[in-house]
C-alpha cells in the first residue's frame, strides 16, 4: 500500500495529483527547479525537494535526481504527471529499480507506444521516409517521435522547406524530451482530433472510457476539449473504442492512457498512443463520475477494475487558460498573476450522480465548474515552462448547457496579470461553428483574426479608470486632511482634467470636468456618470446602467472588469518622453526568453528580404521566429544563441531598402 507519493512534475498536474492523494490519505512530495521555488505545487505538497538549476534538462528531465529526491523524502511511489519524463521508459525502470512503485504503464508498453514511429508500426501504419517525400506528398507533418504537446511538430507545404523544418524539429524535440528523433507523415486537413481514454489493470480488464474531441488547437497544442466527442455515429464510436482497446492489449498495458485519431467523415486515422494521463482527463472524469488519478494509484497497487466502467452521463467541456497573446502570434506573456478567480469554480472533483437528488434529498447544481490551476494569486509566471495557467472545466446534462456555462464563467472571471487567451476562449465557445459542433483542426486558421479582434468598450473602460483614479486621489487627500480639488467651480469654468491610457492596440486620452452639477466626460455622448469610487464607477449609457470594477497594481497597470468584458490598461504620463523612440527597423523581443538560433551567416551588413527569419526565441515551451520587417540591410545584431532577453530588448536593426536609397 502506497504511503508517500512523489510527483515528478510541476504546476497544475502536480497540484491535481496532490488533491487526490489528500483524499486518499497519502503523503505528498514535490520537486522543484529554482524558478519554481515557492510555486503553488510546492506549497500544496507535504514536503518538497529542490532540483538545482533552471532549464528542464538540468532539473525536471533528470530522472536520477528525481529518484534520489524520492528516496531522500521517504516516498514509496512516483507519479510522472504529463510532459517531461512521463513517457520515458528508462525513467520508469529507474523508479522500479529503486524499489519504488511506478504509477504508470510497464516500461515495455511505454517503449512500444511512446515512440510514435514504433506505435504506428504496431498498429499497421507506416510513416513516410523523409528522403522520399515528393511534391505529390505535400502537405506533410514533421513530428517528434517522443513526447507531445506540439513540440517538434511542423507543417511543411513546400518541399524546399522540408530539410530546415526537420532540423528545427529535431532541435526542439531534443531540448524538450531528450530525444531528437522525428518522422514525417501525411498532413490531413479538415479533420477532427478525436481520442479515446483507456484504463487497464494487471488482471486483463481494459476500459474504453468514451471519446473526447480536441480539435481546437493552436500550434498543434490543444485549447478546448470536450467529452463525449459530439456528432459521431455509434458505429464510428464503437470502432474507435475497439482500436483503442486493441492498442492497449497489444502492449499488455496497465494504467491510464489515450489513443488519438484524426477523424474525417466516418474514417479514422490512428495518430498515436499517449502512455500517460492527458491534460484533458477532467472531462472524462466529469462524464463518468470517476477519479482517474485514484484509479491509477489503485491499479499500481494491484487492484482489479470492475468488469465495466460506470455509465457516462452528461457533457463536459474544458478550456485551457494560457498566459499568451493570440493576437500577436500566441506570444507567451510573463509577470505576476495578481488575481485568478471565477464565479462558481474551485479545485474539486466531479462526483457521480450529478444533477440528481442527493442522499439527503437536496438537488445537485444543474451544472458544475472545476478549476485546475498551477498558479495562485501573487505567483509569478516566468519563461521557463508551459504557458498554461489553469484549466476551467464545466459539466452539465447537455452540451449546449456546458458550453454556455463555460463561456459565461470565463467571461466573468477575474484574471489580473499578464495578457491571457481568455477573450479568445470565450469567443471560440460562442462561435457558431463550435456551438453547432462543426469544428475541425483548422478552426483557428480560418477564424483567428475575428476571434482576436479588440473588444468594444475600451474607451469607456479608460474613462472609468480615470474617474476611479480621481476618486482615489480625492479620498487620499481627504484622509491626509488636505483639499484634493478635482475641478473648480467658483466663478470660472474649470479646465478639463486629462488622463492618458494605453490599451491593447490604441492609446486613449480621457477628458472630464467635475462641477457642482456632477462629473461630465467629453467626447462620450449618451454617457452619464452615476457614481464614482476608487474601485468602482457606474455609468448610464443610452439609458442602461453598467458598473465597472477597477483594480490598480504597481507599474501603472489597471484592470477594468464588467460582467461581460475585461480590459487591461496602462496609465501613461500626460506628456510622452520624446527620447523613448526607437530607430526605424528595430526588431524587439516580443516576450522574454532565450535566443536559441540566429540565421546562418547573419551579420551586420548582410542583405535580408522581407519576412526572412533572422532570430529564433524560445519561451514557455514555444519557439518564435523574429523576421525581417522589410527587405534591406541588417545594420545591427545584438542577439546571440544562449542569450536571455527581456521583453522589448533590441535584437537587431534592419534598414529598409527605401531608406537606404533616400540616404
Image (cartoon, rainbow, N blue to C red):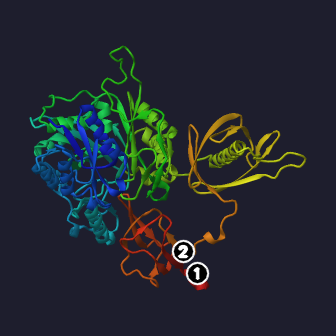
Residue displayed at 56% across by 84% down: 660
Labels 1 and 2: the sequence-earlier one: 2
Instruction: Locate residue 248 relative to residue 592 in the image: left or right.
Output: left
Position in image of residue 472 (x %, y %): 67, 44
Q: Nearer the viewer, mark 1 or mark 2?
A: 2
> Relative to 601, does residue 195 appear above or below in the rendering?
above
Disc number at residue 597?
none
As rendered, which of 335 and 446 lies closer to the eye? 335
Question: Where, by quadrant of the figure, is residue 62 drawn?
Answer: bottom left
In-image side of 497 versus 196 (left or right): right
Residue 359 visible in the picture:
yes
User: Disc count in the image?
Assistant: 2
* Residue 232 visible, this orientation: no
Q: Residues within 10 Å of mark 2 (few under 14, many from 20)?
A: some
Residue under the image location 68 percent in, 48 percent down: 466
Residue 252 position within the rendered picture, expressed as x and y whole percent measured from the top left: 10, 43
Q: For the residue carrying disc 1, how many other residues have a C-alpha within 10 Å: few (<14), some (14-19), or many (20+)?
A: few
Q: Name the element at disc 2.
A: loop
> Disc 1 versus disc 2: distance between alpha carbons?
10 Å
Quick check: marks 1 and 2 in contact, CB under 8 Å? yes
Secondary structure beneath disc 1?
helix
Assign the N terminus to one quadrant of the image: top left
Instruction: Name the residue rendered at 25%, 55% in the picture.
Output: 147
Give the quarter of the image for residue 622: bottom left
Disc number at residue 585?
2
Q: Residue furthest top?
A: 361
Instruction: Identify the residue under disc 1.
Output: 659
Amino acid at each position: 500500500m502506497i504511503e508517500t507519493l512523489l510527483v515528478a512534475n510541476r504546476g497544475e498536474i502536480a497540484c491535481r495529483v496532490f488533491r487526490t492523494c489528500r483524499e486518499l490519505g497519502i503523503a505528498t512530495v514535490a520537486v522543484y527547479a529554482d524558478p519554481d521555488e515557492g510555486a503553488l505545487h510546492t506549497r500544496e505538497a507535504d514536503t518538497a525537494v529542490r532540483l538545482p538549476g533552471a532549464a528542464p534538462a538540468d532539473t525536471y528531465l533528470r530522472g536520477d535526481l528525481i529518484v534520489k529526491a524520492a528516496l531522500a523524502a521517504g516516498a514509496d511511489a512516483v507519479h510522472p504527471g504529463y510532459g517531461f519524463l512521463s513517457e520515458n521508459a528508462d525513467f520508469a525502470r529507474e523508479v522500479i529499480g529503486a524499489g519504488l512503485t511506478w504509477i504508470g504503464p510497464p516500461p515495455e508498453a511505454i517503449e512500444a507506444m511512446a515512440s510514435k514511429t514504433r506505435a504506428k508500426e504496431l498498429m499497421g501504419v507506416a510513416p513516410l521516409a523523409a528522403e522520399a517525400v515528393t511534391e505529390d506528398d505535400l502537405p506533410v507533418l514533421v513530428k517528434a517521435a517522443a513526447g507531445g504537446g506540439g513540440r517538434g511538430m511542423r507543417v511543411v507545404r513546400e518541399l524546399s522547406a522540408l530539410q530546415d523544418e526537420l532540423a528545427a524539429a529535431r532541435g526542439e524535440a531534443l531540448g524538450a524530451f531528450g530525444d531528437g528523433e522525428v518522422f514525417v507523415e501525411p498532413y490531413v486537413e479538415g479533420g477532427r482530433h478525436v481520442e479515446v481514454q483507456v484504463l487497464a489493470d494487471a488482471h486483463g480488464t481494459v476500459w474504453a472510457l468514451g471519446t473526447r474531441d480536441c480539435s481546437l488547437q493552436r500550434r498543434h497544442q490543444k485549447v478546448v476539449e470536450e467529452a463525449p466527442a459530439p456528432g459521431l455515429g455509434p458505429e464510428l464510436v464503437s470502432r474507435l473504442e475497439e482500436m483503442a482497446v486493441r492498442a492497449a492489449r497489444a502492449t499488455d498495458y496497465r494504467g491510464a492512457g489515450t489513443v488519438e485519431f484524426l477523424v474525417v467523415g466516418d474514417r479514422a486515422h490512428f495518430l498515436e498512443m499517449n502512455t500517460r494521463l492527458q491534460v484533458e482527463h477532467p472531462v472524462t472524469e466529469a462524464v463518468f463520475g470517476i477519479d482517474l488519478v485514484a484509479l491509477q494509484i489503485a491499479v499500481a497497487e494491484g487492484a482489479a477494475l470492475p468488469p465495466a466502467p460506470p455509465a457516462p452521463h452528461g457533457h463536459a467541456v474544458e478550456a485551457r487558460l494560457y498566459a499568451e497573446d493570440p493576437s500577436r502570434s500566441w506570444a507567451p506573456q510573463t509577470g505576476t498573476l495578481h488575481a485568478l478567480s471565477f464565479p462558481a469554480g474551485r479545485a474539486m472533483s466531479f462526483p457521480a450522480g450529478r444533477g440528481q437528488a442527493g442522499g439527503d434529498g437536496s438537488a445537485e447544481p444543474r451544472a458544475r465548474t472545476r478549476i485546475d490551476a498551477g498558479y495562485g494569486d501573487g505567483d509569478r509566471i516566468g519563461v521557463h515552462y508551459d504557458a498554461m495557467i489553469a484549466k476551467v472545466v464545466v459539466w452539465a446534462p447537455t452540451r449546449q448547457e456546458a458550453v454556455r456555462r463555460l463561456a459565461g464563467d470565463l467571461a466573468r472571471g477575474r484574471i489580473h496579470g499578464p495578457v491571457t487567451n481568455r477573450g479568445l476562449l470565450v469567443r471560440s465557445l460562442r462561435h457558431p461553428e463550435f456551438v453547432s459542433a462543426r469544428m475541425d483542426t483548422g478552426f483557428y486558421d480560418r477564424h483567428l483574426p475575428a476571434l482576436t479582434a479588440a473588444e468594444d468598450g475600451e474607451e469607456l473602460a479608460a474613462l472609468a479608470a480615470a474617474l476611479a483614479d480621481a476618486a482615489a486621489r480625492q479620498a487620499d487627500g481627504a484622509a491626509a486632511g488636505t483639499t484634493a480639488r478635482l475641478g473648480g467651480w467658483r466663478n470660472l469654468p474649470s479646465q478639463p482634467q486629462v488622463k492618458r491610457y494605453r490599451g491593447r492596440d490604441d492609446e486613449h486620452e480621457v477628458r472630464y470636468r467635475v462641477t457642482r452639477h456632477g462629473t461630465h466626460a467629453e467626447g462620450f455622448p449618451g454617457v452619464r456618470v452615476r457614481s464614482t469610487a476608487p474601485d468602482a464607477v457606474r455609468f448610464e449609457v443610452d439609458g442602461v446602467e453598467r458598473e465597472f470594477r477597477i483594480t490598480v497594481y504597481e507599474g501603472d497597470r489597471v484592470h477594468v472588469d464588467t460582467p461581460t468584458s475585461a480590459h487591461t490598461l496602462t496609465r501613461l504620463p500626460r506628456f510622452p518622453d520624446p527620447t523613448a523612440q526607437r530607430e526605424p527597423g528595430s526588431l524587439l523581443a516580443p516576450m522574454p526568453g532565450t535566443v536559441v538560433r540566429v540565421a546562418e551567416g547573419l551579420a551586420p551588413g548582410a542583405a535580408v528580404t522581407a519576412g526572412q527569419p533572422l532570430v529564433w526565441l524560445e519561451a514557455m515551451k514555444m519557439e518564435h521566429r523574429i523576421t525581417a520587417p522589410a527587405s534591406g540591410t541588417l545594420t545591427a545584431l545584438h542577439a546571440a544563441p544562449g542569450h536571455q532577453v527581456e521583453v522589448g530588448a533590441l535584437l537587431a536593426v534592419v534598414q529598409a531598402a527605401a531608406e537606404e536609397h533616400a540616404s
